Amino acid sequence: MKFEELKSPYDLETFIKEWGANPEEGPYDFGEILALLSACLDNLKKYALEAEIEDIPEYLTDEQAKLIKKMADYIPAR
């Protein structure tokens, strides 16, 4: 699937999950993936209710939760 073919949020989710799997569609771009993650975080900060934030673990697999915790270890305290 190419980016131009996206028609729904589900298509976008599928595209992001598979981005990088097909070299013919272009190179994997770590920076762009992080930009998308950043946009998602900004959206959650702006629109998510506290009760929804508390429910985040219910939406994540164990592997996803471990990755988030691992990434957080690399973020210095500010």
Image (spheres, rainbow, N blue to C red):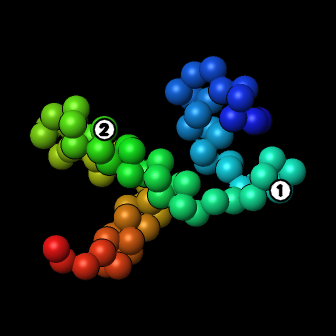
Of mark 2 and mark 1, the one earlier in the sequence is 1
Distance between the Cα atoms at labels 2 and 1?
30 Å
- Which quadrant of the rendered structure holds the C terminus? bottom left
Residue 46 in percent (x, y) is at: 21, 37
Q: Residue furthest top?
A: 7
46 relative position to 30: left or right: left
Residue drawn at the location 22% of the way across and 32% of the way down:
47
Q: Is residue 36 left or right of residue 24?
A: left
Q: Quadrant of the N terminus?
A: top right
Under mark 2, the amino acid is Asn
Against 67, residue 25 (above or below) is: above
Local secondary structure at mark 2: helix
Q: Residue furthest right?
A: 24
* Left-right relation of 32 to 29: left
Which label sits on residue 53?
Answer: none
Can residue 61 be seen here? The reply is yes
Residue position for label 1: 23
Which label sits on residue 43?
2
Disc tally is: 2
The image position of residue 35, as x and y in percent, is: 46, 53
Query: Neighbour class for label 1 at 10 Å: few (<14), some, many (≥20)?
Result: few
